[in-house]
Amino acid sequence: MDLEKIEKLNELKQKGLIDEQEYSEAKAKVLGAKSASDPVVDMDNRTYSMLLHFSQLSGYVVPMFGWIVPLVLWLIKRDDPYIDQQGRVVFNWIISSFIYFVICFILAFVIIGFFLMAALAIVSIIFIVLGAIRAKDGGIQNYPMSIGFFRVEPTPVAKIQP
């Protein structure tokens, strides 16, 4: 069983027979990752990152909360690499959608902007839901149409650590 293998690895590490790097790589292999750099994301981080994405919807209820709540959530757990990457994804979209909204507002003087604002609201909800689902599955990827203000390292869906 995995627990027994990890306990044996821990004993070897405590006895000094393997160093920290060897321990991390062996533990990652036991947990199902191909290497220590292959992401193994625990359930708490996946749930937290999903909430980080969904927190953008709070802006539809209370203006300005759509960027304040995600910012607070991101800053609380920014030291975790997975949450940090998800926060970058979220804020790439928040800044991009603000720019798109300003363009739509300017175009509202020629009527087309109102239709574009409605389309932006619908697309934003769809992207947020898709991003939350991807985060829950352990993947990192920018939203479509998102401008890359923060560097995001896309990853496929990660292995799950219970």
Image (spheres, grey):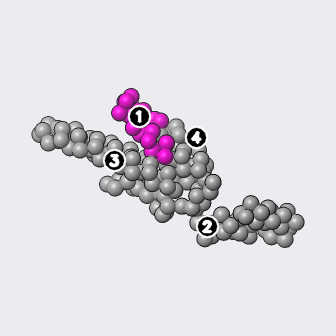
Q: Is residue 14 left or right of residue 115?
A: right
**Residue designated by label 2:** 33
**Residue designated by label 4:** 76
Residue at image location 60% in from the left, 71% down from the top? 34
Q: Which residues are magenta?
A: 50-69
Q: Is residue 37 left or right of residue 127?
A: right
Proximity of marks 1 and 4: CB atoms separated by less than 8 Å? no
Query: Amino acid type of disc 3?
Result: Ile
Residue at image location 34% in from the left, 43% down from the top? 125
Residue at image location 35% in from the left, 49% down from the top? 127
- Cα distance in 3D space between marks 4 and 3: 26 Å
How crowded pointer 4 is (Cα within 10 Å; few <14, some 14-19, many 20+) is rated as: few
Query: Amino acid type of disc 2?
Result: Ala
Q: Earlier in the sequence, mark 4 or mark 3?
A: 4
> In terms of secondary structure, what is the magenta stretch mainly?
helix
The vertical placement of 118 against 41, above or below, is above
Which mark, by number, is residue 58? 1
Q: Earlier in the sequence, mark 1 or mark 4?
A: 1
| Residue at the right extreme of this rendering | 15
- Cα distance in 3D space between marks 2 and 4: 27 Å
How crowded pointer 3 is (Cα within 10 Å; few <14, some 14-19, many 20+) is rated as: few
Q: Earlier in the sequence, mark 2 or mark 4?
A: 2
Q: Earlier in the sequence, mark 2 or mark 3?
A: 2
Tell me, yes or no, whether the highlighted magenta stretch contains residue 64.
yes
